Structures are given as C-alpha cells and as structure tokens.
Image: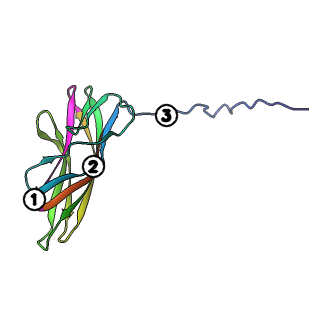
Amino acid sequence: MIHQQTLLPHPYMQSSVQVVLPKAKGGIRKTSNQTIATLSTAFVAVTNYDVPLYPTSSGVTVNLVAGTVTAAKAGDYLIIANLDATCTSDNNAGRTVTVQAWDAVANTAMPNAEVKVFVGAYAAGFQASVSIPFTAAADNKSIVMKINAVANISNVVILSAVIALLGV
C-alpha cells in the first residue's frame, strides 16, 4: 500500500523565495589586443571590443567598436570596469596609471569614477578593476573606459577589458 502525505508549511514559515534581478544590464568584453605605443598623460579610450558581455542586454545598449555602454533611461546604475595590460617598464621610478569611466557624449570624466594603479620599475604589466555607482540624470548616458599615465610607459598592450552597466 502506498501512503501519500501532504506536508503543510508551518504557519510562521514563508513558502516563497524572492529573487531580485538588475533593472537593466549590458556590457562588452575585449579579448583582442589593443596596442598603445606610449601611454602618457593624454587619456586613451579602450575601443574595439569583441563580444557583448550578456547574450541579451536589457535597458543598456552597447557599441563594440566605440567601446561604449549606454543607459537607455535615467536612473541609478553601477559601472563595472576591468582592464589587464602588459607594458615595457624600465629602471625609472614607478608610475601611476589611471583608469576612468568617461561620459562619451560630453567627453568628460565621470565624477569619482577612477582607480589609480601603481606600475613599479621593471614591471611587465598592470591590472585595474573599478565598480562605481552613478546616477544617469538623462536618457542615453554613454560610458567609455579611458586610461592614462602620469609619466610615459612604453609598449602598452591591453590584453583584455570589460565594461558593464547594471541598473540598481
């Protein structure tokens, strides 16, 4: 004889699970090299990405060639940017590299949207990661990642990069 029993939840237990997903998401990934002969004080945009980060973006458009992620509407977002590069360093004192998120339309740095990385003497490369909350006050706010150096660094090759926007 098979006995079947139905289990009822305890009155004090909740039987549902809530999953919170980002309101918007979109990003791009770079896996092909981008060579910068000499990285100096002038900011250089990271461009020519290879693939979208998500199979399906929502509320964020991406431009692989320009290297931009664009918020479709005003709201609160989180910028996530990662960069991995090699370089030729020398025995001079170390140098600082800045990785910033820029407003691609206004061509200005986003406020508080940078990370500084120290590249020591004889270093063969550097990595940087940054996660920054920001509020897009208007529709179509485009973000691009740019880098520079306080003093020249030779033969910089960006090996990989990611930039993404998540709505919060």
Residue at position x 12%, y 71% in the image = 93
Drawn side of residue 160 relative to residue 144, left or right: right
**Label 3 neighbourhood size at 10 Å, few (<14), some (14-19), many (20+)?**
few
- N-terminal label among 1 and 3: 3
The residue under label 1 is 150
Identify the amino acid type marked 1: Val
Spatial CA span between label 1 and label 2: 25 Å
Q: Dividing the image into 4 quarters, which one contains the C terminus?
A: top left
Image: 158 above or below 153: above
Q: Residue at x 17, y 65 (%)?
A: 88
Q: Nearer the viewer, residue 42 or 22?
A: 42
* Element on which disc 2 rests: loop
Residue 151 is a magenta residue? yes
Q: Which residues are magenta?
A: 136-153
Q: Residue at x 24, y 32 (%)?
A: 70
In the figure, 127 relative to 8: above or below? below
* Residue at which label 3 appears: 19
Kind of residue sitting beneath label 2: Ser
Could you say whether the residue bearing mark 1 is in a helix, strand or loop? loop
Q: Left of 24 or right of it: where is 38?
A: left
Label disc, if present, on residue 32 of the rendered structure: 2
* Residue 130 picture location, percent across and down: 27, 49
* Pointer 2 or 3: first along the chain: 3
> What amino acid is at disc 3?
Val
Q: Residues within 10 Å of mark 2 (few under 14, many from 20)?
A: some
